[in-house]
Image (spheres, grey):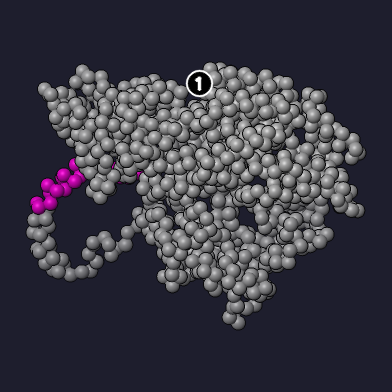
Amino acid sequence: MGQTISHYRVLRKIGGGGMGVVYEAEDLKLGRHVALKFLPDDLAHDAQALSRFQREAKAASSLNHPNICTIYEIDESDGRTFIAMELLEGQTLRHRIAGKPLEIETVLDLGIQIADALDAAHSKGIVHRDIKPANIFITNRGQAKILDFGLAKVTLKPESVAMSAPTIESEEHLTSPGQAVGTIAYMSPEQVRAKELDARTDLFSFGAVLYEMATGAMPFRGESTGVIFKAILDAAPPPAVRLNPDVPPKLEDIINRALEKDRELRYQHASEMRSELLRLRRDSESGHRSAASSGTVAVGEAPARVAKLWKIAVPILLVALVTAGGLYYRAHRSKPLTDKDTIVLADFANSTGDPVFDDTLKTALSVSLRQSPFLNVLSDSEVSKTLQLMTRPASTKLTPDVARELCQRAGSKAYIAGTVGSLGSEYVLGLKAVNCQSGDTLAEEQVTAASKEKVLDALGEAASKLRGELGESLATVQKFDVPLSEATTSSLEALKAYSLGRKAHSEKGPAAALPYHQRAIQLDPNFAMGYWAVGIDYNNLGEVGRASEYFTKAFQLREHASEREKLAITADYYQFVTGELDKAAQTYQEEIASYPREPVAYGNLGYVFGAHGQYEKAAAFTRQAVRLAPDNVVWYDNLGNHTFALQRLDEARQVIHEAQARKLDDYILHNVLYGLAFLGADSAAMAEQQQWYAGQPDYENDGLALASDTEAYAGHLGKARELTKRAVDSAIRTDNKENGAIYLAIAAQEQAAYGNPAEARQTAAEALKLSPTSQGAESEAALAFAMAGDTARAESLSQDLEKRFPLDTQMQSLWLPAIRAQLALDRKNPASALNTPHSASLIELGQIVFVNNLSCLYHVYVRGEAYLAAGQGSAAAAEFQKILDHSGIVWNCWTGVLARLGVARANTLQARTSQGADADLARVRALAAYKDFLTLWKDADPDIPILKEAKSEYAKLQ
C-alpha cells in the first residue's frame, strides 16, 4: 500500500483469487482511480499464466462496450506485469445471487446486457470460454460488466473485419490439445469433451448463469468433477419453475434452449437470446398480445361475411355456454391453490370431550399434508412469529377466526379448519379449506371413523381427498400418500406426546421438547418419528453420542414414516451415525428434488458441505434455507458459522444481527458472537456473551468452556483448569456428561501440548470415565493420550474408533490419521507420521459437530510437527500458517496459539539449513514469529514448560 507502480499509486487491496490480485490505485497522470490487476506471486513468472494474462488484456481492450470492463493498458514495473482497468463499484453476480433467486425483472435486465456484451465479443471473433457469475460484475447502478478474458479464444476473422481483430498469440501455445478449459459447473458439453469451441459454448454457459439468476441454484451440481461432467453431458437440470415458481414459462424456454446439449439445437448467436429476452421483458411490462391471438376480425372485412359467421357461431356458442355453464360455475366458484401459496392449519374443534384429540389431530393433519410436494404448510416458527405480530402469545388457540387473521397477516392463501365429534361409538371428522381473504370455501371433506383406533386413518383419507380438491395432481397424491397410522403411530396418546413436544420445541427449544418426545416413544416403541425427534433434541443440545442411538432406531423403523420423513431420517442417519457424508448429501439432494420448497433439506445439505469443508457451497444452500424459512434460527446459526469459516467476519456478524432483528436467539448465535469478539480482541464483547451464558442454565457449560479455551490460549493454565472444572460440573447438572467429557479431553490436549504429560493423561482418563462411549470424547481423548506419550492407550482407542466407525468420513480422513501420526512421532518416526494417509482436500477444514468452535485442525497441526521432526522447515511452516490463515475455523483453540510458535521453529530450522540471503530472511521471520508468540503470552503462567522452551530458543536466535 502506498507504493508507486509506473504512474499509479496503490491505495488498497480490493480483491484476489487464483489468477489475479486486484488493487485500487490512483492514476497520477490523469488523476482518476483505476483497478490494477497483478498475477499472484506464485504465478508471476509462470510463462503460461503470463500469456493468459496478456491475452486477457489484449482481448478485452479490443472491445469497446458498456457491458465489458474497460482495459486502459498493460504494463510492467520491476518485473511485475499488471493490467490497468476500469474501477468498478458494486459486487460480482455470484455475490449478488448468493444462493437466492433474483427478481425476474432484474434477471431480464441483466440478461439483456450480458447477451449484448457477448454479441459484441463474438462479432470480433472472441469467445470468452469462462462465463460464470464470478466473472460478471454488477455495478451499484445495476450495470453488468463481463470480466476476465484470461481464457478467451480468438478465431480468425474475414478480411473485412481483420483490421479490428486483436493480434493475440495462437491458442495452441496457451492450452494443451484436448484440454478442457473453463469453470467446471458452467462448461458446455463440448468443453467437457475438450472439442473445438465456438461462440455457442458461451451461450450454454450463459444459459447456466441465467438459470442460477432465476433459481439461486446452479443447474449442474455434484460431489465430484465426474458427477458434474456427467450431469452436463446427460442430465437436464431440475425445472427452473420448480425452484422458483415466479419464473415465467417463456424464460424457462429461453434457458432450456440455451442449455441444449447439441449445439446445433442451441441458440446460434447471442443476438437471438438478446432479442427473446427483450421481447419477454416488453411482454412482461405491457401484457402485450399479438392480434393473431386476440380473435378480432380485421378492419375492412365484408359486413355480410361477418353476419354470416355470426349466424353460425351464435347458436353454437349458446349451446356451448348452456352445456359448460355448470362446469364453469363449479370450476370458478373458488380458485384452487397454486404451488406458490401457503396454508395455515387451525386447531381442531374437539367436541368429543376426549383431550387426547387436542393438538394430536392437527399434528397428524400436518404430517399428512406435508407428504405433498404441492402444498406448503406454514411452519410452526412462522406461526409463532405472526402471533407475536398480532400481540398474541405463542400458545394462542387457532380458532377459525384467529387462523383467518393469522393467514392474512402471514400472506397465506387459505386456512384449513378441522372438527372432530362423536356419534355413538363412531367419530365424525370434518376438514374445510377457506380462502382467508374472501372467506370462500375452497374444499370440504367429511369422513366417519368406526372407532377411536380408526380416527387417524380416516383423517388421512380425508386429507388425501382434500389435497386433490386444492389443486394437487392425482399422480403426486397417489405417490406420496402413506396412511397416517403408518406414517406416524397408531397410538393417539403417543402422537399427543409428540405433538406437545413439537409445540414445546417451537416455543422453548430442544430441552423443553425432550421429555415429551421421550414419552412418545415409551408409549409406542415403534414410533419412527418419535425416535427421530429425540435424536434431533439431543443433537441440538450437543449430545451427539446420545443422538446417534435414537437416529439409529429411527432409521431401523423408517418404513413406519412418510416418504418425506423417511428421506430426512435416512439422511440424518448417514450424517450423524455412520458419518457417510456423501450418502447424506445424496439423500438430502433427493429430498430437495421431491420437495424443492423444503428448507430443512437445503439447510442440512449446507451443514453436510460444512462438515466436508466446502463452506462456499455450505453457505449457498443455507441461504436457500434462510430464504424459505426466514424465522428458523438454526439456519442463521449455520450461515454465521459458514461465513465465519470463510474469514468473512463482517458477513458473519451481519447474519447474526439479521437473526436478532427477527427476535431469534439461541446459544449457537452467542457462540459465533463470542468467536467474533475473540478474534477482534474485544474483551467487553466477550464478557457480554459470558453474561448471557450465565443466565442460561442449559447452556452455561458452553460459555464456561469457551472461556476456558480463551484462558488456555493466553497461557493462563491455572484459570483454564478452574473454568474447565466449572464447565464440567455445569454440564453434569444438566445431564450432559458427554459435553463435560469433551471439555476434559480438550483440556488434556492443552496440558500435553504445553508440556505437562502426566496431568494430561490423568485428565484424559477422567474424560473417558465420565462418558466412555461418546465418539467425540473418545476421539479427543485418544489424541490427548497420544500427545501425552501414552501410546498403548491411544492405540487401543484408535483401534476401537476404527472398528466402531469404519464408514465415518471425518473419522477416517481426520481423526485416525491425526492420532496415528502423533503415535508415529511418539516413536521418533516422523517419516511414518508423514506417510500416514491424510486428505489434502477441503475436508481437512471441515466443521466438527461436537465442539464449540468449528475445528482445531489437529491433523494440520500434527502434520506440521511431523515436518519439523523430519527437518523440513518450509513444509512445516506452510502447515502451521494454514492454521493461522483459518482463524475463523480455529477461533480460540490451543492449536491457534501454538501454530505461531510452530512458524517460529520452522523458520529457525530453515535459517539453519539455508545459506546467504535465504538464511537471513528465514531468521528474520523466525524472530518475528517468536516475538508474536511471546507477546501473546506476556502474562502467561511462568511455569509452563513450552513457554520456557520458547524463551530459550528466542534468546539463542537473537
* Residue 809 image point, x, y percent: 54, 45
Q: Is residue 247 left or right of residue 783?
A: left
* Residue 199 image point, x, y percent: 53, 70
Tell me if I can see residue 431 in this picture.
Answer: no
What residue is at 43 percent from the left and 63 percent from the top? 234
Q: Is residue 435 left or right of residue 681?
A: left
Asked if the stretch drawn in magenta spans residue 326, the answer is yes
Q: Is residue 104 left or right of residue 752?
A: left
Depth check, front residue: 1 or 39: 39
- Element carrying mark 1: loop
Q: From the image, tell me which residue sits under label 1.
A: 735
Depth check, front residue: 562 or 100: 562
What residue is at 69 percent from the left and 28 percent from the top? 760
Residue farthest to the front, as pictured: 792
Tell me if I can see residue 896 in this picture.
Answer: yes
* Residue 200 image point, x, y percent: 50, 69
Give amino acid for label 1.
Asp
Q: In which quadrant is the C terminus drawn?
A: top right
How packed mark 1 is, by other alpha carbons closer than 10 Å (few <14, some 14-19, many 20 or more), is few
* Residue 354 image point, x, y percent: 22, 19
The magenta segment is 322-345
Q: Quadrant of residue 333?
A: top left
What residue is at 46 percent from the left and 64 percent from the top? 233
Q: Quadrant of residue 748?
A: top right
